Each structure stands twice: as C-alpha cells, then as structure tokens.
Image: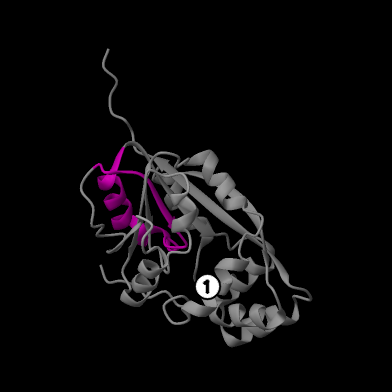
Amino acid sequence: MPIIPSPDIWYWPDVYERENAAQDVDGVIFATLREVADWTGRDVVDIGCGTGFHLPIFARDARSVLGVEPHAKLRKIAADRVAGTGIGVLAGSAEALPLPDSSVDVLHARTAYFFGAESAPGLAEANRVLRPGGVLVIVDLDTTAHDYGSWMRADLPHYNAVAVERFFADNGFDLRRVDTRWEFPDRPTLAWVLAIEFTAATAARALVSTPGLALTVRYRIHTRVKPRGLALR
C-alpha cells in the first residue's frame, strides 16, 4: 500500500512544530491515554511519529520507546531530537512495522488513521506486533464538533465521520471523546497553522471567526486490547 503524504507536517515541519506546541495545552489527551493505555514500564511504539514531538513524553515512564516514520526528512528531525536518550527512530509504516511479532505493549498513532476502512492493513499489522494484553490507541480529530470540526468538514465534503466510527466499532475498538484547548502565542502563528491545515478560503474564514488565540478541538481516542487468548480451566 503506497504511503500517503501528510498534507501538513511533510511540507511545513517548522510550522507543524508550532502547532504541536499549541495543541492540547491542558494535557487532556495524555491524561486520557494514562487511563486507557498506561505506558508505565512498558514498550511503546509511536506509529507515524513525525518529528518525534511525543516520543520524550512517553519516555519519561516507559521501559522503551520507538518512533516509526516513513518520511526520511521527518525521521532525521526525530532522530536528532532524541539523540543520546535511548529512544529509537526507524523507517517504516503502519502497514509494515519494522518489529518482530508480539514485541510491543502500547502502539500509539495520532492522526494517522483518519480514513476508516483504508486503515485495515495497518490494524492487522498492529495486531501482529502487539503482545497479548497490549493496546493499540488511535488518536484522531473529531470532525463533528466545534468550529474546527466544521472547517474540516468544509474541506473534506466526502469524509463520512459516521462510517469511520462504525468501522472502528466493528473492529472492536472502544471510543472516548475529549475536548482540548489549543492556545497560540500570537496571531501570526495561528494564521500559519490554519494555512497548512486548511484550504486558503477555509483558513481565511477560520482566522476571521477566531477573535483570540485559542481554539477548542475535539478528538476521538480509539483503543483496542489484543486478547490474551483462551483461559485454561
């Protein structure tokens, strides 16, 4: 399956770094991840780790952390970020993880499984590398809520959020929705981020309709635990 370039971070990693810094300033996502996929003392892999922004956060408590990224430029930035820390960064994709069977406790993917049924090969690969009892956690944007969701819907008229959520539910995932606060240091940074995330027309409308420096953005957090197998009686 061909790698689909990310429309934002692949081309504007510097701006996306500012976006990462502005996202979820209250830490709601990681607090929820603690509840549904605690990584303390476990082996963690971040699929599509980009520039490695989240790798050091996992490394504070995990036994081991590995980032997997298909794009060479981003992979180099991630490797430079974590140099000397013991965190690894490898080439690979969701459909072809460079890992042995049953070797991972927590697989994390953030905004990397956006299109539902197209994720099926990656879900099968995740099941291969997870240990029994391990968890796959997929963090994705929720297009159904708040202004940010409406801007996404404007630019993705064929995206069917109901069908995507049904796909994950049919494949055994639990779902949590979380509202987060994005806060930017200034208006130019806000404008730059909107410009890489949306078409020019939508970005302009979004900037005008955002009077301050903050946005409310809802996420979906999908989790699926790999069964431990049949219990012996």
**Secondary structure state at the residue bearing disc 1:** helix
Magenta region, residue range: 102-131
Let me know if residue 127 is in the magenta part: yes
The image quadrant where one finds the C terminus is top left
117 relative to 17, above or below: above
Let me know if residue 180 is in the magenta part: no
Query: Closest to the observer: 146 or 7?
Result: 7
Residue 220, image x, y percentages: 55, 53
Q: Amino acid at mark 1?
A: Glu
Residue 212, image x, y percentages: 77, 74
The image quadrant where one finds the N terminus is bottom left
At 48% from the left edge and 64% from the top edge, which residue is drawn? 53
At 62% from the left edge and 86% from the top edge, which residue is drawn? 201
Q: Is residue 50 visible?
A: yes
126 relative to 141, above or below: above
Q: Is residue 156 visible?
A: no
42 relative to 13, above or below: above
Residue 62, image x, y percentages: 42, 44
197 relative to 231, above or below: below
Give the mark count.
Answer: 1
At 54% from the left edge and 79% from the top edge, which residue is drawn? 15
Is 230 left, or right, of 58 in this rendering? left
User: Which residue is most to the left?
Assistant: 100
Is 7 left, or right, of 184 in this rendering? left
Q: Characterize the local packing of mark 1: few (<14), some (14-19) or many (20 or more) Cα atoms within 10 angstroms.
A: some
Where on the picture, by quarter, is residue 170? Answer: top left
Q: Which residue is mark 1?
A: 17
Is 182 left, or right, of 209 in this rendering? left
Where on the picture, by quarter, is residue 215? Answer: bottom right
User: Which residue is most to the top?
Assistant: 233
Where on the picture, by quarter, is residue 86? Answer: bottom left
Residue 9, image x, y percentages: 46, 75
